[in-house]
Amino acid sequence: MSYIFLAIAIVGEVIATSFLKQSEGFTRPLPTVIMAVGYVITFYCLSLALRTIPTGIAYAIWSGVGIVLIAAIAWAVQGEKLDAAALVGMALIICGVLVMNLLSRSAGH
């Protein structure tokens, strides 16, 4: 169940961060509200996930997957460019999260 809470926290963060840009410095009410609600859901679910997932592992997954998803959404929806270095960096982030989860004993498996 903890990994479900972590997944919800990741999705909430991706949505909230995407709407953070759309809020245009908190000047647009609807994107600002969606952003705020997204972050509340994110941190609540992250706190539930931390009941059983070690903090370092949960944070690595949350931030790593979040970075990759936010960059992908920014590319697909907001037209931001991703060069080869950015793609390699995101691949390394994914590899790091996989190594921590599949090979590290600190992952709690």
Image (tube, helix red, strand yellow):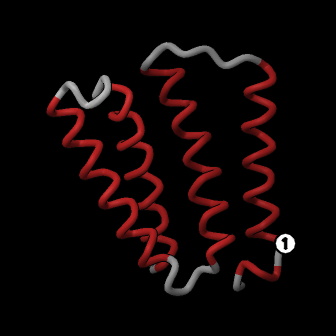
**Where's residue 19, x and y in %?**
33, 34
Image quadrant occupied by the N terminus: bottom left
Q: In which quarter of the image is residue 29?
A: top left
Secondary element under disc 1, as helix, strand or loop, is helix
Residue for point 60% across, 69% down: 58
Query: On the rendered structure, is 108 left or right of 68?
Result: right
**Where's residue 57, x and y in %?**
67, 70
Q: Quadrant of residue 28?
A: top left
**Where's residue 103, x and y in %?**
84, 72
Q: In which quarter of the image is residue 80?
A: top right
Please tell me whether residue 31 is drawn above or below residue 82 in the rendered image.
below
Residue for point 81% across, 31% down: 88
**Where's residue 32, x and y in %?**
23, 37
Residue for point 24% across, 52% down: 37
Residue annotated with mark 1? 103
What is the three-letter code of the residue carrying label 1?
Leu
